[in-house]
């Protein structure tokens, strides 16, 4: 039961951080930095910081290579964490 709660918490935290990153893609902070701030601190602090930046003109998006790199690293870290939790739960 505890392993399922940890898995649910990690997945929820990651998804909310990605949503904050997507919001940041339409602002001057960009996806990567918004996601990084959300992942390091909390999604609430990341949301506040992201909303402090101005919107990009005409609905443009700012992704940058940092966004792609962070998304790949986050997926890899989440996979490793989930495998570790599952291995600990079955041992």
Image (cartoon, helix red, strand yellow):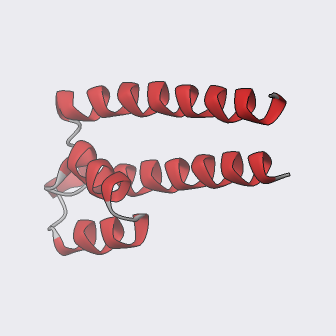
Residue 45 in view in this figure? yes
The quadrant where residue 50 appears: bottom left
Residue 11 on image: x %, y %: 61, 46
- Looking at the picture, tell me which residue is in the foreground, 17 or 90: 90
Count every numbered label the image shows and give the total.
0
Q: Residue at x 78, y 53 (%)?
A: 2
Q: Residue at x 76, y 46 (%)?
A: 3
Residue 43 on image: x %, y %: 41, 64
- Looking at the picture, tell me which residue is in the foreground, 26 or 84: 84
Q: Residue at x 86, y 51 (%)?
A: 1
Residue 37 on image: x %, y %: 27, 57
Horizontally, is 48 left or right of 83 in the view? left
- Looking at the picture, tell me which residue is in the foreground, 29 or 72: 72
Residue 8 on image: x %, y %: 70, 51
Q: Residue at x 83, y 29 (%)?
A: 90
Q: Is residue 46 above or below residue 91?
A: below
The quadrant where residue 61 appears: top left
- Looking at the picture, tell me which residue is in the foreground, 88 or 15: 88
């Amino acid at each position: 039961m505890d392993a399922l709660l940890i898995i649910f918490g990690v997945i929820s935290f990651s998804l909310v951080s990605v949503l904050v990153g997507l919001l940041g893609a339409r602002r001057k902070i960009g996806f990567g930095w918004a996601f990084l701030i959300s992942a390091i601190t909390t999604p609430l602090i990341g949301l506040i910081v992201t909303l402090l930046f101005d919107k990009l003109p005409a609905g443009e998006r700012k992704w940058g290579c940092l966004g792609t790199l962070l998304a790949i690293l986050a997926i890899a870290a989440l996979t490793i964490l989930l495998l570790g939790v599952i291995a600990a739960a079955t041992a």
